[in-house]
Each structure stands twice: as C-alpha cells, then as structure tokens.
Image (cartoon, rainbow, N blue to C red):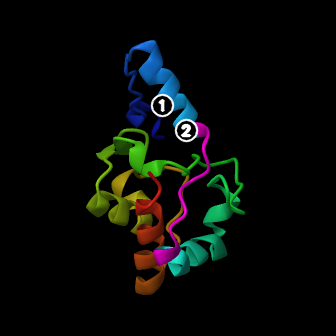
Amino acid sequence: MQHANMLLRVIVQPQADFEKWAAAQRLDGPSDLRIESARATFLSLSCVNCHTVTGTSASGTFGPDLSHLMSRETLGSGVIPNTPENLRAWVKDPQAIKPGNLMPNMQLNARELDEVVTYLSSLK
C-alpha cells in the first residue's frame, strides 16, 4: 500500500567521505549510561523482534536497523523529516503518519513512549 511513498535518496560523496560513513554505520549503536533505563525499556518491548540495534540484544531482521537512526534525514522511508517531534509521532502511531506501513501501533503508555523516544534519539 505504501510503496509509492518509499522515497529513497542517493547522496553522492567523495570516496573517502563515503568510506568514513560506511565504517561508522558498521559500528555498534552508541551506548549512554545516562539513559540506561530508556535503553532497558526499549529492549524489553517487542520492538526488538523486528529491529536491530547493533551491540544490543535487539536483533530483528524484519524492520530497519535502528543502530544509527538519528544519522538519517527521514523516517518512514522518506515520508517525514527525522526530527525529535516526528520521531515521537512515528513511534506513538506510525499508521497515522503512513497508513498501511508494516509497523504496528505498539500502544505504549506515556512513560514507555518517553523512554523509547529518548533511547532512539541517542542512536546517532
């Protein structure tokens, strides 16, 4: 239903810049002890069944790898800019932003939503 809204970007860079970017993408997702409870909340939810964050127990293969989520310009395959506000809206109810996408509304309570967004926002 949403293939027409999958906006893929091609960014042309000098070879050295591309190699630096590619190497950074292979690194484990960042870990910040100040948000350990947010990380623990994310890892306790079923998000990990679909998504991967390298260096954690999240090893799903169905959804996008979130290891460096905040290094991306957009969310939802290009549907909205990747901003903290849009990330929160996407996690809260992805169907409201991109009807028919395969990510379900997880029905997170306010604390879970805050913590998941805090954790995801740290993944640069």
* Amino acid type assigned to the residue bearing label 2 in the image: Gln
Up/down of 12 relative to 118, above or below: above
* Amino acid type assigned to the residue bearing label 1 in the image: Trp
**Which residues fall within the magenta stretch?**
26-34
Residue found 62% across the figure and 50% down from its top: 28
Q: Is residue 9 visible?
A: yes
- Tell me where residue 72 sits by quadrant: top left
Residue at label 2? 25
Which of these two is toward me, 106 or 81?
81
Crowd band around label 1 with a 10 angstrom C-alpha radius: few (<14), some (14–19), many (20+) = few
Counting labels gives 2
Q: Main secondary structure of the magenta part?
A: loop
Residue at label 1? 21
Residue found 34% across the figure and 41% down from its top: 73
Which of these two is toward me, 104 or 73?
73
Q: Is residue 29 magenta?
A: yes
- Residue 72 lies left or right of residue 61; in this view the side is left
- Local SS, label 1: helix
